[in-house]
Image (cartoon, coloured by chain):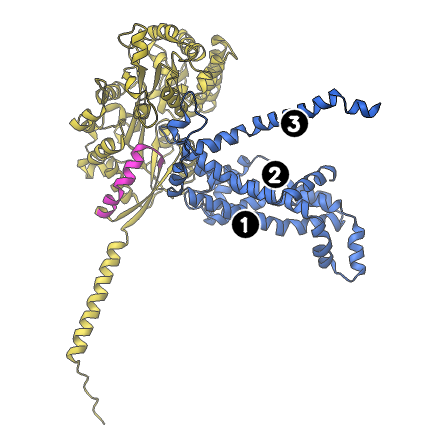
Chain colours: A yellow, B blue
């Protein structure tokens, strides 16, 4: 038998092999570093906050290895898509914007993952830092289903120069005096009052402060209360403002049109969301910014009840990447992320007390002597008392739509206040009965 | 006498009034389009200036912003899905219409009625079933998914419109072609189809428009990859305000292919519409 020749490895082969093995290992490590740990998908409305997240996203992706695809859309599109994606259990989106008025329906249907197990693990989220009214809509008992990034509170904006000229040293602090002021300053060129067409959010400012309510006692007794004397009186006051002292089409002006009206100086007083203030005083769009001032919304005989609309982030129950989704939410509503969004992207309607009281935020958002962050925080605290619970019942979206239809019909003279509100009451009763809502009245 | 009356002052007045009325009407009808285009070429501050200024230095910034956004991808999706649907609808629908027009089988009327089934209810009635089926077939947010949906709606349009054109064409022309040795396909391709070119152009435009302007199905059956331009434009309505500049620039761009296509086949379109109006 012939012995097999021994195969000795030469030094050159050894070095070459070593280099090759090193190169393979290095390539593997690079590839591993470039391959994301997980890719998650998120949908939300186009907003200053989402712009801020997009700008900071690479930092999050680098730190966590989680890639995030953010789908931004308009609010009407989001309403349709979010409902459809959640209802179908597709799991295509891991994180979805929790829409305030849909929260009741989505939580009842079990489409939002409870966040308590994640919160128990990550104490740094500091839920107590969210101002009461901002987290209340997403809490059921002790369970939290979403964390808020936006709390839009109602605020009054006015042209200080016009009010001064008309003899008003300060804006009206009651709805009665608002009515008088609007009548006094209204001209063909400059309307006395303007607001956006989301009337089911604006009218309750009047309704609740006169002792009225949408329902007897939400969420336990949803007997509608649209035909009460308080509802009738406030509907009359509100629609009078829309019909007589607003620009043409007063009940049907969307937020964007309201902004344009204020930019052009076609109205002297407006009532809208706090989150829009930055747009109103955007000097690239108006030459009147330095004449604008802001204040609390007026009060009624029963007190001051500004409205609040909150939006948050939820983890889709059908998501297969819940851990990664949580890591994203934790970062997206984190103190530092929110602070950057406030300072660099003009996000004023923050939900965290720490951010609203930050010296740089105070400095940036104090306008003509008004401490805007303090105004906003006060409204959020008030809303935490529970008077906003009527907006998060599962049946709210269709009821809200009907309120808009009724108030628009009254404001446009198609029906009287009494007939319009009675018809609304009947309609709401019928709808709530069909839905099996609790009605004790 | 008659000729002098025809050339009289009333006639002269009519000569001035009619074009003026037509011009005025055109201005009213086209003003929103003009306003849209002007809006797209101005800054937002300039667009809302009161009183408005007629002549301002135009800016392309809105188009540049659009170019840098995801709108281009949406525009491409619209172009691909609308063109593919138009071509496929014609390829499948025209022979079907020809068969229904010429074959003369017994259940032809019933069959024609069933072809219309997809158009018998508003799109929203089919929305949820399509979404659920597409979810199972993994067709959500795909161009293929949109093409299939648009095809199902456009086919009935092609079949009904083209059938009317074929019905209006004398069979003797095809019979002459048969005598000259042409087969069914040859007669169809060389004689019938060229004579129906105006109808074909009209039908193609309607098919293209239906798919190009669709909002509903794109809204519910796409997410981000296959999103089309009409929905992408709506997404410029931000929560706090609307980006009017981008909306008007996007709308202007959306109009362009349709205007270009319509101008290209204008001659056929007018003949086709007229023919379709008296036959069928």
Q: Secondary structure at mark 2?
A: helix
Q: Chain of mark 2?
A: B
Q: Main secondary structure of the magenta part?
A: helix
Q: Is residue A149 left or right of residue B35?
A: left
**Segment colored magenta:** A44-62
- The vertical placement of A58 against A149, above or below, is below
Q: Chain of mark 1?
A: B
Examine the rendering and report whether any part of residue A240 can be seen. Answer: yes
Q: Is residue B262 left or right of residue B48?
A: right
Instruction: Determine which quarter of the picture holds residue B161.
Output: top right
Sequence-wise, the earlier of marks 2 and 1 is 1
Q: Which residue is mark 2?
A: B119
Give the Cα distance between marks 2 and 1. Answer: 20 Å
Q: Residue B27: x and y, percent?
A: 57, 27
Residue drawn at (17%, 76%) of the image: A14
Instruction: Determine which quarter of the picture holds residue A373.
Output: top left
A342 or B137, which is in the foreground?
A342
Q: Residue A369: x and y, percent?
A: 21, 17
Identify the disc placed on residue A373: none
Identify the disc placed on residue B19: 3
Residue drawn at (25%, 46%) of the image: A61
Sequence-wise, the earlier of marks 3 and 2 is 3
Q: Secondary structure at mark 3?
A: helix
Q: Which residue is mark 1?
A: B84
Residue drawn at (24%, 38%) of the image: A330
A263 or A418, which is in the foreground?
A263
Q: Residues within 10 Å of mark 2 (few under 14, many from 20)?
A: some
Q: Residue B57: x and y, percent?
A: 41, 32
């Amino acid at each position: 038998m012939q012995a097999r020749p021994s195969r000795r490895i030469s030094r050159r082969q050894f070095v070459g092999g070593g280099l090759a093995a090193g190169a393979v290992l290095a390539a593997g490590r690079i590839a591993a570093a470039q391959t994301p740990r997980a890719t998650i998908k998120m949908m939300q409305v186009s907003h200053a906050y989402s712009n801020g997240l997009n700008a900071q996203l690479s930092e999050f992706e680098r730190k966590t290895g989680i890639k995030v695809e953010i789908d931004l859309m308009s609010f009407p599109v989001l309403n349709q898509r979010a409902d459809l994606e959640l209802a179908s259990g597709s799991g295509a989106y891991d994180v979805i914007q929790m829409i305030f008025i849909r929260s009741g329906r989505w939580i009842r249907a079990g489409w939002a993952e409870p966040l308590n197990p994640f919160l128990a693990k990550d104490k740094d989220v500091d839920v107590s830092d969210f101002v009461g009214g901002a987290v209340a809509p997403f809490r059921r008992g002790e369970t939290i289903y979403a964390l808020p990034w936006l709390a839009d509170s109602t605020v009054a904006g006015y042209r200080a120069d016009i009010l001064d000229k008309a003899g008003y040293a300060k804006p009206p602090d009651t709805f009665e005096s608002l009515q008088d002021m609007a009548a006094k300053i209204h001209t063909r060129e400059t309307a006395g009052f303007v607001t956006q067409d989301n009337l089911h959010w604006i009218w309750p400012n009047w309704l609740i402060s006169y002792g009225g309510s949408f329902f007897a006692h939400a969420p336990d007794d949803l007997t509608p209360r649209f035909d009460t004397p308080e509802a009738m009186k406030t509907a009359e006051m509100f629609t009078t403002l829309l019909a007589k002292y607003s620009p043409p089409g007063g009940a049907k002006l969307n937020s964007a049109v309201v902004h344009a009206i204020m930019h052009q100086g076609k109205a002297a007083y407006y009532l809208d969301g706090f989150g829009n203030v930055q747009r109103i005083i955007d000097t690239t769009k108006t030459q009147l910014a330095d004449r604008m001032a802001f204040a609390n919304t007026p009060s009624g005989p029963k007190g001051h009840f500004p409205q609040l609309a909150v939006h948050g982030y939820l983890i889709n129950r059908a998501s297969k990447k819940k851990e990664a989704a949580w890591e994203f939410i934790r970062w997206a509503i984190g103190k530092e992320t929110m602070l950057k969004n406030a300072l660099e992207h003009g996000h004023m309607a923050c939900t965290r007390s720490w951010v609203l009281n930050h010296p740089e935020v105070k400095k940036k958002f104090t306008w003509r002597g008004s401490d805007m962050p303090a105004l906003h925080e006060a409204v959020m605290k008030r809303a935490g008392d529970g008077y906003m619970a009527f907006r998060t019942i599962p049946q709210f979206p269709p009821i809200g739509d009907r309120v808009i239809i009724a108030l628009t019909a009254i404001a446009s003279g198609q029906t009287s206040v009494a007939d319009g509100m009675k018809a609304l009451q009947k309609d709401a009763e019928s709808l709530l009965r069909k839905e099996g809502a609790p009605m004790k009245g | 006498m008659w000729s002098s009356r025809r050339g009289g002052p009333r006639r002269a007045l009519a000569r001035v009034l009619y074009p003026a009325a037509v011009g005025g009407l055109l201005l009213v009808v086209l003003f929103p389009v003009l306003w849209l285009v002007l809006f797209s070429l101005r800054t937002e501050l300039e667009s809302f200036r009161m009183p408005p200024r007629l002549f301002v230095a135009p800016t392309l910034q809105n188009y540049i912003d659009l170019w840098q956004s995801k709108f281009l991808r949406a525009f491409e999706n619209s172009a691909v899905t609308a063109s593919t649907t138009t071509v496929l609808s014609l390829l499948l629908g025209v022979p079907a219409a020809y068969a229904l027009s010429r074959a003369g089988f017994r259940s032809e009327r019933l069959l024609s009625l069933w072809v219309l089934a997809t158009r018998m209810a508003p799109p929203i009635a089919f929305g949820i079933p399509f979404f659920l089926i597409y979810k199972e077939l993994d067709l959500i947010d795909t161009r293929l998914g949109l093409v299939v949906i648009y095809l199902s709606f456009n086919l009935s349009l092609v079949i009904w419109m083209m059938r009317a054109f074929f019905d209006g064409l004398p069979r003797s022309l095809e019979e002459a072609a048969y005598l000259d040795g042409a087969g069914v396909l040859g007669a169809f391709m060389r004689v019938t189809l060229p004579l129906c070119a105006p109808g074909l152009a009209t039908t193609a435009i309607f098919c293209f428009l239906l798919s190009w302007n669709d909002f509903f199905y794109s809204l519910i059956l796409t997410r981000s990859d296959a999103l089309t331009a009409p929905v992408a434009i709506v997404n410029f309505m931000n929560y706090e305000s609307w980006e009017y500049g981008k909306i008007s620039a996007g709308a202007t761009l959306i109009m362009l292919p349709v205007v270009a296509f319509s101008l290209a086949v204008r001659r056929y379109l007018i003949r086709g519409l007229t023919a379709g109006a008296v036959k069928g």
